[in-house]
Amino acid sequence: MTMNTTAPCRVCGQPTTLHARARLLGRHDIRYERCPACGFIQTEQPYWLAEAYADAIAASDTGLLRRNFILSAVTQSVIRSCFNPRARFVDYGGGYGALVRLMRDAGYDYWRHDPMCANLFARGFDTTPSAQPDAELVTAFEVFEHLVNPQEELRKMLSFSRNILFTTLLQPAPAPQPGDWWYYCLDTGQHVALYTRSALETLGRAHGLHLVSDGKQLHLFTEQKIAPWWFTLISRYRIARLRSSFAAGSARIAQDHATAREARPRP
């Protein structure tokens, strides 16, 4: 591939065109390619990821804990409205385990899957598709923009559940240049996939799923037909925070504490 040759779209497979050039991590000059068919923006094949993920969680992600508090309330509201709150759930790309810990504290049977990051807050609750093939819902918050191969990675998520609640910022229109939109995250080099609504719809449709979206950041792949106005309403933080005050069941703090003590090696 020459320096000016672009790769097929990693969402729909159509030819892409050169969208922009930018410098990542202060030292890598790379191409961004855009699909005229679905609007998806991808980097060239990301050879820099080992450097970008030297730390799994970027130091500049200072909003991580606040985001998890907000998304815990939103997730509870969506579950209570559309799914069985007594079922099992998986946080895909769960990072330090903060969301899993918050959801278990609220009474939900929540588990974490993230082989790339240390589990600090929900140790003992990591899982795999073979262990949880029938989860009610997968959450994947701030994950999709990291996916080098979205189709392949979505198949992995679907091995847990056919329902996926996720966040990723949709591109503004017209498609912005790297210097005009912070979500390119040029300082970390970790965001390699930027979506339009059309790109997400195409991605879901390839797997027989409907897309429900708030039109900005929060989205749901599901086989259910959920009215967009209802999804937007129940996912508003003020409403979600009120609804999350009604826990799904008893907090699992004491139960998980006992499990951790039993798993600790004896002298």
Image (cartoon, helix red, strand yellow):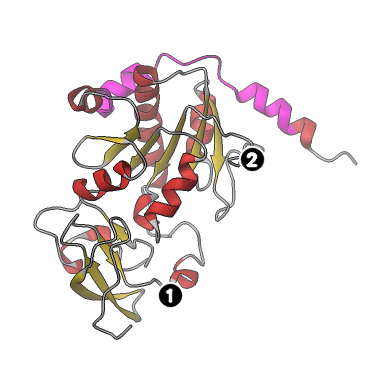
Q: Provide the secondary structure element on which disc 1 rests.
A: loop
Residue 84, quarter of picture: top left
Q: Is residue 236 magenta?
A: yes
Is 244 included in the stretch rendered in magenta? Answer: yes
Left or right: residue 70 compared with residue 217 = right
Q: Position of residue 115 (x, y in %)?
A: 58, 52
Q: Is residue 61 shown to the viewer in this render?
A: no
Dot 2 crowding, Cα within 10 Å, few <14, some 14–19, many 20+:
some
Circle on res. 47: 1
Q: Residue furthest left?
A: 174
On-image quarter of the C terminus: top right
Give the left or right position of residue 50, taking residue 167 as reference.
right
In this picture, which residue range is highlighted in magenta?
234-260
Residue marked by disc 2: 123
Q: Earlier in the sequence, mark 1 or mark 2?
A: 1
- In this view, the residue in front, 11 or 88, is 11
